[in-house]
Amino acid sequence: MNPLVIPILLEKEVNRHTYLIIKDDISILIDPGAKHHVPLLLAALEEHIEISKLSYIVLQSNDYLNLTSLEDLNQKGFHGKVIVNEVGVPYLENMISNDIVTIESLDYKLKFGDGQTLEFISMPFLPFPECYVSIYIEEGFLFSAHLFSHHTKNQKELINSINQFHESVLPSIEFVRQAVKKIKKHNIISIYPRLGLVIHKLMIPDVYQGILSYDFYNSNQVVERKNKKNVSYNYETICNHMLKKLETKYHRYEILDAFKDSEIYLELYPHIEIESTKLAGYKLWNTFFDTIYQKKGVSWLTLLESVVKKYHKSFNIQLPAIYKTTSYLQQSKIEILNVEKKNLEQEVEELSSKITETTDKLLRCSITNLYNQRFMIGHLLNNLDQPLAENKSRCLVLIHIDNLLEINKKYGVHKGDETLRNLVHIINNMKQEDALLFKQNGPGIFVYRHEIDEKSLTALAVKLSNLVKKSELFIEPITITISITSSSELNTRYGLDERVNQFIELAQMRLERAKLKGKDQILDQHTDEKTFTEGIILLVDEDETYQNLMVKIFDRIHYQVIIAKDIYDAYDQLETHNIDVIISEINLTKLDGFQLKQKINQSQNFRNIPFIMVSHHKNLDVVTRCNLLDVDFILQKPIIPEELIGHIKRIRDQKVMIS
């Protein structure tokens, strides 16, 4: 059974709580409160457990507000044991008849029947010399007594409220830091303070950071009030506090060096503090800061300024003279501006780094970590027209794994991804330094050679193919198919953008033709059929600009375009050529595209040729008439080349499958 922790509110004004832990047949009450809390405490306990069945009361401090309830609780039927430290025993022996157990005798641990543990950790001077906290180790519950106490219900104000409470009752931040250091060794899930609300896991790291970075130093030696009018200050003690503040940022030897040859002598051990000085009072106060300014400048004074102003505000101690000088104020502003500038530069650098990282992720394949096809296009646009050495060419190699689909089906996609990564590994190990690898927008790998002779590249392709076949990196033996495309094959009449597109499409089309021959193929412009064409397209359109555009688009993917200006010319071309696809404008001078399709439908020879209708006006009437005539696709001008190419490729693939 998991332990149950029940917070019991004893005093609403300050959110004073006690905590009841119920674990199997054991029940424990943590810090029961004062005598005036007993009626509320008993009423709350009755809802969960009879007072006579309460196993333990744990007293985490021996203060009045924690002890005076015990006598009444004993009279009301509490007969369990009281757990306290050794210092608390004399207070209780004459007060109650219950068994008193010390945390020392328990070896600082209370064991439950199933081996779980409530551990007690000494926290001296928080706020009393003999204090301790309790941790339910297995559950990560910390019962922190005064530590982490606060007076707010607003989470945004929580850290500030804890710091204010600590400063009001605890001796200094040094004791808090030691306590937190002990607590952080445990995985704390929830903190149950004496005053305030429970602090849950998500807030705990911020609470640790917030209280450790807050500086305070309470000491009755700092200020001694002689009478209502006169106040004396122990400036040496205050200066020692300043030394501790400096030590949070600078090494103690650097601090020692700052006061070398001055009228203030420091000692290093056990703490860095003033050993001796002939100076006293306000003269010591001023000399201390003057020395720092002369040796270390404004940055050290800036670090101490918040603490100095706090003493000034809290105890009305005059500011050191150096803080009032014009030169300090000016240099302080410069220092602040420099810090702000440095912080801003760091923020800009971090933002720039994040932008670069994000951009890099967008341009890389998550499986192979190669730059993607989009990045490759940018690279080609920047490099394709660079000067070439004689008898050299730019070459684009496209590589596909022949049995990748079978591996995905047989072993799962993750093994397919691993196969791709292993292929990239092999290519990287054998490639030349100037070879660049890119991931295709599909299952393939592009290799770009900026300057190479084609024969050497073909030899490298053969070598790669053999290495892959012999490799034991793969889950099962694989083969690859390779296409090699040279920049010498590109149409020099095209602009740069068009040539880059043609380069990539030639590589992809050649790879598809290689696959038609079987597995483990290598195809370049010499082994590819020189007169090869994917098919013949009949274009029926009167617009010469559109005609030229279509010729360029289909030349990139090896389609021949025959142009007809009207349906009579179109029919003659059908009789003359083996047409694979017809693309027709609707609006023609003599007869329109609908009449052409109607005439073709009447022909047994031509009715099954795929027909694409194009027009500037695509509406319901056009779509209805096209559907009645069995038009395959209806496209609206201006044509998107990639859309049209996609339709043509699907028509071609369907034809291959039917064949």
Image (spheres, rainbow, N blue to C red):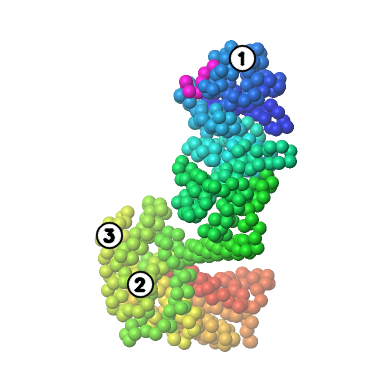
Q: Quadrant of residue 147?
A: top right
Counting residues from the N terminus, which is met first, the one under dot 2 or under dot 1? 1
Check residue 435 in the rendering and tell me which mark sits there, or answer none: 2
Whole-number angstrom distance, CA of label 3 to CA of label 2? 21 Å
Counting residues from the N terminus, which is met first, the one under dot 1 or under dot 3? 1
- Residue 166 within the magenta-colored segment of the rendering: no
Counting residues from the N terminus, which is met first, the one under dot 3 or under dot 2? 2
- Mark 2 or mark 1, which is nearer to you? 1
Q: Return the residue nearer the eye: 168 or 499.
A: 168
Q: Is residue 355 above or below residue 582?
A: above
Instruction: Provide the residue span drawn in magenta.
Output: 100-106
Name the residue: 45% across, 59% down: 366
- From the image, tell me which residue sits under label 3: 471
- From the image, tell me which residue sits under label 1: 95
Q: Is residue 179 above or below residue 368?
A: above
- Residue 104 within the magenta-colored segment of the rendering: yes
Q: Return the residue nearer the eye: 549 or 417.
A: 417
Q: Is residue 206 visible?
A: no
Residue type, mark 3 in image: Ser
Name the residue: 65% across, 50% down: 309
Dot 3: few (<14), some (14–19), or many (≥20) neighbours within 10 Å? some
> Where residue 345 sits in the image (x, y, percent)?
55, 64
**SS state under label 1:** loop
Residue type, mark 1 in image: Met
> Where residue 34 sits in the image (x, y, percent)?
67, 23
Residue type, mark 2 in image: Ala
Whole-number angstrom distance, CA of label 2 to CA of label 1? 89 Å
